[in-house]
Image (tube, rainbow, N blue to C red):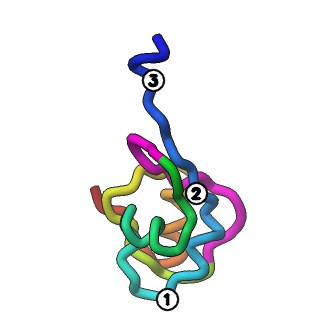
Amino acid sequence: NYRYKKEVATVALEKLNNFEAGTVVTVDELKAKGYVKNKFDSVKILSGGELNVAVTVKGVQTSKAANEAIVKAGGKVEE
């Protein structure tokens, strides 16, 4: 049913390279950079590209591959 459809904004993993190491990346941070716009119910980071900085992703959904890449780069994912 369209009425119950959830809008998920997606962000490519490589976009996180534009944050400084140690940054806590939240939905608000992604909005401030212009990576998510319009109305959405949630945000999900997908594994597009490589990640070269250690960031903490907080309150944002991640795909399994993106999660692994974030940890491999020295970062972490928190709920």
**Quadrant in which residue 23 is drawn:** bottom left
Q: Secondary structure at mark 2?
A: strand
Residues at discs 1 and 3 in contact (Cβ within 8 Å): no
The answer to which of 26 and 40 lies nearer the viewer is 40
Whether residue 47 is situated above or below residue 21 in the rendered picture: above
Residue at which label 2 appears: 11
Disc 1: CA contacts within 10 A as few (<14), some (14-19) or many (>=20): few
Estimate the x, y position of residue 35 in percent, counting from the top left.
57, 64
Q: Which residues are magenta?
A: 39-51
Lower sequence index among marks 1 and 3: 3
Relative side of 62 to 59, left or right? right
Q: Residue at x 40, y 86 (%)?
A: 22
Q: Amino acid at mark 2?
A: Val
* Residue 2 image point, x, y percent: 48, 16
- What numbered label is drawn on residue 20? 1
Question: The residue under label 3 is which amino acid type?
Answer: Lys
Q: Is residue 76 visible?
A: no
Q: Residue at x 65, y 69 (%)?
A: 14
Q: Nearer the viewer, mark 3 or mark 2?
A: 3
Marks 3 and 2, how far apart in space?
19 Å
Of the two numbered discs 2 and 1 on the same chain, state the one appearing first in sequence. 2
Image location (x, y in percent) of residue 66? 55, 57
Q: Which residue occupies the foreground of this view, 74 or 17? A: 17
For the residues marked 1 and 3, what is the alpha-carbon distance in whole angstroms? 34 Å
Residue drawn 46% across the image and 66% down it = 31
- Residue 45 part of the magenta-drawn span: yes
1 is higher (above) or lower (below) than 14: above
- Residue for badge 3: 5
Which of 5/74 is in front?
5
Helix, strand or loop status at disc 3: loop
- The outermost residue toward the right is 49
